[in-house]
Amino acid sequence: MTQIAAAHTDQTGAANAARDMADQINAALDGPPDALVVFASSSFDYTALLHELDARCRPRVMVGSSSAGEFTHDRRGVGTASALAFRSPHLHVRATIGEGIAHDSRGAARALVAGFQGLDGSRHPYRAALVMTDALAGRAEEFIDEVTLLTSGRYLLAGGGAGDDAKFSKTHVFRGTEVFTDAAVALEILSDKPIGVGVGHGWQPTGAPLRATEVDGMRVLGFNGLPAVEAFERHAHDTGQAFDRADPLPFFLHNILGIDTGNGYRLRVPLAIDDDGAVHCAAEVPEHARVHIMTTTSESAAEAAARATRAAVSALGDSTPGGAVFFDCVATRLRLGDGFGMELEEVASALDGAPFVGCNTYGQIARSDRQFSGFHNCTAVVLALPR
């Protein structure tokens, strides 16, 4: 049977935090974990934290990232750390890395996938990868698309972009006790039992569609041939909302962009405005894409998280969930405030008592059969592991 431990700490200092989480993990498992997944605030000395966890838990593999809010099924915080550990005769793991995403995202994807052991048609029928990337390096969508192509769509994917407590300055990923920027890490999981990934968001389009007529990476310069900021100003006027060019984030958190894929909307969070009226987003918007300004409610966000969790649990088939990893956007946490706890309660309820661990990220990664796939913003992603 799979054993899964969830740990969260609000201890300050890397050594204290690592000891606290290690004590929780070691008390829940019969021996050293096969895998340890770590999410940590930018307030920590990552190297010291990872070395202490490695020494005290002795995991076979360890991966993770910096984050922007950390939580488990019963605790949450900001400036904290969380971790999930598991031992299992059914789950077989390996940690891989791809570097240099900013200049060669496809090369980084090839390096990441080259270490996967399940590509050769191994005896394990179920394959997944938990992927964390340095989202501030950019090109995350291209990177995930390449990973999906290289794995022939045979791997479920779940994960997100590393955070830094909403500073948007520098983010990191972890493999073993090493810390990297401009890189992505993966925990490959091969299983004798089904693994589940669920995806959901509660946003709906509002207003007329827009065409992204000029784009430079994560900067949208124009909609419908006009400066991008004017579309948001017009929407604010039409909906009776306040909009301040000097401080647009409060408006942006409630009015994000949805890229029309023909099969739903892939979300992008606007973050800032340039002097020329260009709008910076948390991830790339394709040039000429048809987009909408989107709206949501706290209830819709919580239901989306519940829906994603139910989909992940359903994908386990006859297996019951042993535990899960849950990701949602830092923008969701900032928008909901204390209401984010309602979303976590919905996830816990849908898991029916199984523990979960997660963090707020700068974008979410998902690939699941018959569901929305790729790199997202403001989207709930759940990776469910069988008992």
Image: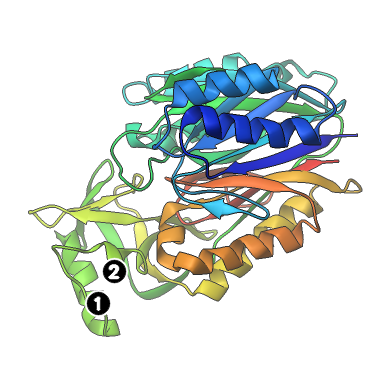
Is residue 184 visible in the rendered structure shown here? no
Mark 1 vs mark 2: which is more N-terminal? 1
Q: From the top left corner, tell me how far across and down residue 101 is, in percent.
A: 38, 24
Asked if the residue under mark 2 is in contact with the one under mark 1, i.e. CB atoms within 8 Å, the reply is yes
Looking at the image, which is closer to me, 235 or 145? 235
Quadrant in the rendering for residue 129: top right
Q: How is the image coloured?
A: rainbow
Q: From the top left corner, tell me how far across and down residue 192 is, in percent.
A: 86, 30
Classify the position of the C terminus by image quarter. Answer: top right
* Residue at image location 19% in from the left, 60% down from the top: 228
Kind of element beneath mark 2: helix
Locate residue 5 relative to residue 173 in the image: left or right. Answer: right
Classify the position of the N terminus by image quarter. Answer: top right
Q: Nearer the viewer, mark 1 or mark 2?
A: 2
- Amino acid tagged 1: Ala
Q: From the top left corner, tell me how far across and down residue 380 is, in percent.
A: 57, 55
Kind of element beneath mark 1: helix
* Residue at image location 56% in from the left, 75% down from the top: 299
Classify 21 as above or below 93.
Answer: below
- Amino acid tagged 2: Phe
Quadrant in the rendering for residue 258: bottom left
* Residue at image location 7% in from the left, 54% down from the top: 275
Q: Which residue is mark 1?
A: 236
Q: Name the disc covering residue 161, or none.
A: none
Locate residue 22 relative to residue 203 in the image: left or right. Answer: right
Q: Marks 1/2: CA distance?
A: 8 Å
- Density class for disc 1 (Cα within 10 Å; few <14, some 14-19, many ≥20) is some
Q: Which residue is mark 2?
A: 251
